[in-house]
Image (cartoon, coloured by chain):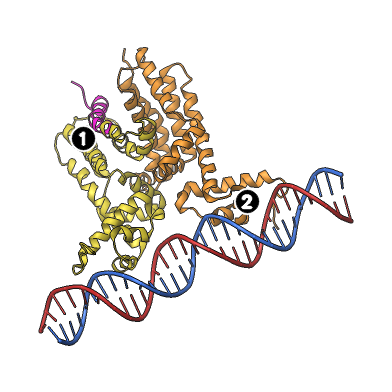
Chain colours: A orange, B yellow, C blue, D red
Amino acid sequence: MDDLKNKQSGNVSEQVILNAARDVFMEKGMDGARMQEIADKAGINKAMLHYYFRSKEKLFDKVFVEAFKEFWPQVQDALKIESPHEALESIVQAYIETFMEKPYLPNFILGELHRTPEKFGLLMNEVGIQPKVIVDFLQQQMEMGYLKKTNPMEMMINIISMCVFPFAARPLMIQLLMKNDEEKWNHFMEGRKESIMNIIKECYFIKQ
Amino acid sequence: MDDLKNKQSGNVSEQVILNAARDVFMEKGMDGARMQEIADKAGINKAMLHYYFRSKEKLFDKVFVEAFKEFWPQVQDALKIESPHEALESIVQAYIETFMEKPYLPNFILGELHRTPEKFGLLMNEVGIQPKVIVDFLQQQMEMGYLKKTNPMEMMINIISMCVFPFAARPLMIQLLMKNDEEKWNHFMEGRKESIMNIIKECYFIKQ
DNA sequence: ACCGAAATTAACCAAATGGTTAAACTAGAT
DNA sequence: ATCTAGTTTAACCATTTGGTTAATTTCGGT
C-alpha cells in the first residue's frame, strides 16, 4: 500500500522534500507556493517540512541556493577555455542548455531577485558567484587583441540577454509566435546557440 | 484632518484605487500583494476595493491591462516610421524609455506571464497586441533590401532581449556591477540606446 | 428641509495558511 | 526484549487574508 516509503534513512526524506519543494517553488515562486502542496508532492506530512527545514523561508533559501549552484559552475567553467571563440561558445551553450533542462529557473531567479534584492547579495556570496569574472575575461581578451575593444560589461549583458531573455518570455513566445507548439520553441532555441554565436562573431570578433 | 478626500465623484476614488493597486501589484506581484496594503496606500477602507472591483483578481486584471496599454502603443507607433533605421531606433527608445519610467513593469509582466499563461493570451487580445507586426515589419524591410536577409523572428527576439533583459535583471546588475549605485545603472541604460543601435547596425543593416 | 442613491466605514466571517505539539511509530544498539 | 533517539503523523492553533454585511455618511436634486 504505502509503496516505496523510505522510513529509516532520514536524509532520503530530506531529498524527497527538496525535490518537491524545488518543483513547487520554481513553478509558483515563494509567494505562490503552499507548504501543503510541497508536502503532498513529496508524499509526506506537512509537519515534516518543518521538522527538516524549520520554516518556509529556510526551505525556500535552500532550494534557491541549490538551484543556483546547479547552473553557475557551468558558466564559470566555460571561461577556463583559452580560445575566446570556444569560451564564448561554451557560455552560450551553458546558459541555453541548462535552461532548456530547467525552463522555470530563469523566471524563478528573476522573480526572487525582485522580491528580496537584499537577500540576494548574501546568497550570491554563499554560492560564490561573481559576474565580474566574465567581464574580466572579456576585458583580457580585448587587451590581448582577440576581441574588438568595446565596453566589456555591455558585451556581457548583450550575450546574457540574448541567451536568457527568451526563457523569461517563453510562455509568451510559445503562445504568440509558436502557435502553442512547445516543440517549435525548443527547436528555435536549439538553433539560437548558433545564431547568437553569429551575432557575437560579427560584432565582437576581429575580422581578418 | 481628512485632507483631500474626494467623496462625491466615484471615478476619482476608482482612479485612486487603481493607482495604489498598480504600485502594490507591480512591486509584489499578484501573489505577494495584499488587499489591505492597497487600501492603506489608497487611504481608504478595504471594503471599497470590493465595492469598485468585486475581487482581487478583477482588480489585478484591470491594473494589468492598463499597464500593458500604457506601453505597447509606443512600440507599435514606432513601426509607422518608414526608414528602417529610424523605426528600429524608435523601438529601442520606446522600450528603454518606457521601462526607465516604470522599472517594475517588465518583471511584473514576465511574472504574470508565468503565473497564468492561459489568461495572458486573452488579455493580449483585449489590448490588441500582436508581436507579429514587428516580425512582419522586419520581413518587409528585408525583402525591400533595406535590411540583411536573416530570420526576422530571431532579429526581433535579439533586439527585445537586449532592451528588456537588463530591466528584468536590474536589481542584480545594480548590486553586482554598479556597487549599489542606481544612478550608475540609469546612466548605463541611457548609453545602451545607442550601443544597441550599433549592434543592430553592424549585424542587420546592409553596409555600403 | 428632505429624499434617495451612491459612497464609505466598522465589524464581521469563513477559509486558507504557516507553524506547533504531543503522541505514536521505527529501527538500531544493548 | 527493551531502551533510545530519530522519524512521522493527526490534530490543533493563531494569524492572515479575501471577501461580506449592515449600518452610516455624503451630497446632489427637489
Asked if the residue at tag 1 contacts the one at tag 2, i.e. Cβ–Cβ closer than 8 Å, the answer is no
Mark 2 Cα shell of 10 Å, populated few (<14), some (14-19), many (≥20): few
- Residue type beneath disc 1: Leu
Q: Quadrant of residue C12?
A: bottom left
Residues flagged by tags 2 and 1 on a common chain:
no
Figure check: B143 above or below C27: above
User: Circle 1 is placed at which residue position?
Assistant: B88
- To which chain does the residue with label 1 belong? B
Q: Determine the residue positioned at 39% across, 46% down.
A: A171
Q: How far apart in space, not on screen, are marks 2 and 1 (Cα)?
A: 56 Å
Q: Nearer the viewer, residue A110 or B151?
A: A110
Quadrant of the image containing the C terminus of chain B: top left
Q: Nearer the viewer, residue A170 or B107?
A: B107
* Residue drawn at x 45%, y 52% as measured from the top left: A31
Magenta residues: mostly which secondary structure? helix
* Residue type highlighted by circle 2: Tyr
State left or right for residue A190 relative to residue B149.
right
> Which of A190/A3 is in front?
A3
Q: Is residue B83 visible?
A: yes
Say whether residue B151 is left or right of residue A56.
Answer: left
In this picture, which residue range is highlighted in magenta? B188-208
Tally the numbered discs.
2
